[in-house]
Amino acid sequence: MQLNQRAYALLEKYSDGLAQACGQTRTDRYFSLTDPKETQLRDAMLEDSTFLNLITWLDVDQIQGQVVNVGNLAAAQTQGVPDGCLSGDVAAEGEIELSSKAFAIVNAKARAAGSWRGIAPVDLMWYAKAGEEELKVEAFGCKLIVSDVLDVDPKGGSVMTHKIKFLVTSPDFVRLGGVPYLESALTQKLTG
């Protein structure tokens, strides 16, 4: 990971302050945080918009999956007889289900951007798992849209969750198991 000078300086300042707050004299060693200190640190990070702009990913509890129509592919016909295929437009979307704790991080990112709509599109990566099988899925340029913020179970008994829908907006589109869904010839002019 490459950092610019400003990001490096902020991380150094953060590391020094954290070490000092935890009673450490050296910042080149690992140290642990007590639960109260971790909570204070998390709250401070959520309020600091300078630091939030450095966050480019979010580790979520789970991503809810659904079957998504990613394209219109039809058989070409000559005089009613199948004769190859025609590729149509493509689109992909999904939904992330977050705990309230994870939602607070994304909400702070929205605050730093000035609004939810102001959040720049993000790249998402997750592993689709079923039993022993696993598939790496990547979606690029995902525009986040809040969907079920107020959908809370009044009986309680489980963790309150929030759903954030996303639309894939980048020409890089989607990769399944590291393989692009779209041919590079289609996206070459769009990506440069």
Image (cartoon, rainbow, N blue to C red):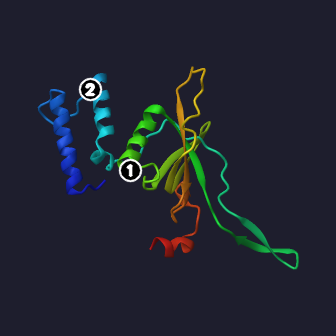
Q: Residues within 10 Å of mark 1 (few under 14, many from 20)?
A: few
Residue 33, label in figure: none
Q: Residue at x 20, y 34 (%)?
A: 18
Residue 169: give x, y in percent of width and height: 53, 60
Quadrant position of residue 148: top right
Q: Is residue 160 visible?
A: yes
> Residue drawn 26% across and 55% down?
3
Q: Which residue is mark 1?
A: 114
Residue 45 sits in which quadrant?
top left
- Say which residue label 2 marks: 37
147 relative position to 51: left or right: right
On screen, 179 above or below 163? Answer: below
Which residue type carries mark 2? Lys
- Judge from the rendering whether residue 65 lies leftward or rightward of residue 14; answer left or right: right
Q: Amino acid at mark 1?
A: Gly
Pinpoint residue 9: horizontal percent, then vertical percent.
18, 49
Residue 191 pos. (x, y %): 47, 70
Residue depicted at 31% across the width and 49% down the height: 54
Mark 1: which secondary structure? loop
User: Looking at the image, how many numbered discs can be counted on the residues?
Assistant: 2
Image quarter (top left, top right, bottom left or bottom right) of the C terminus: bottom left
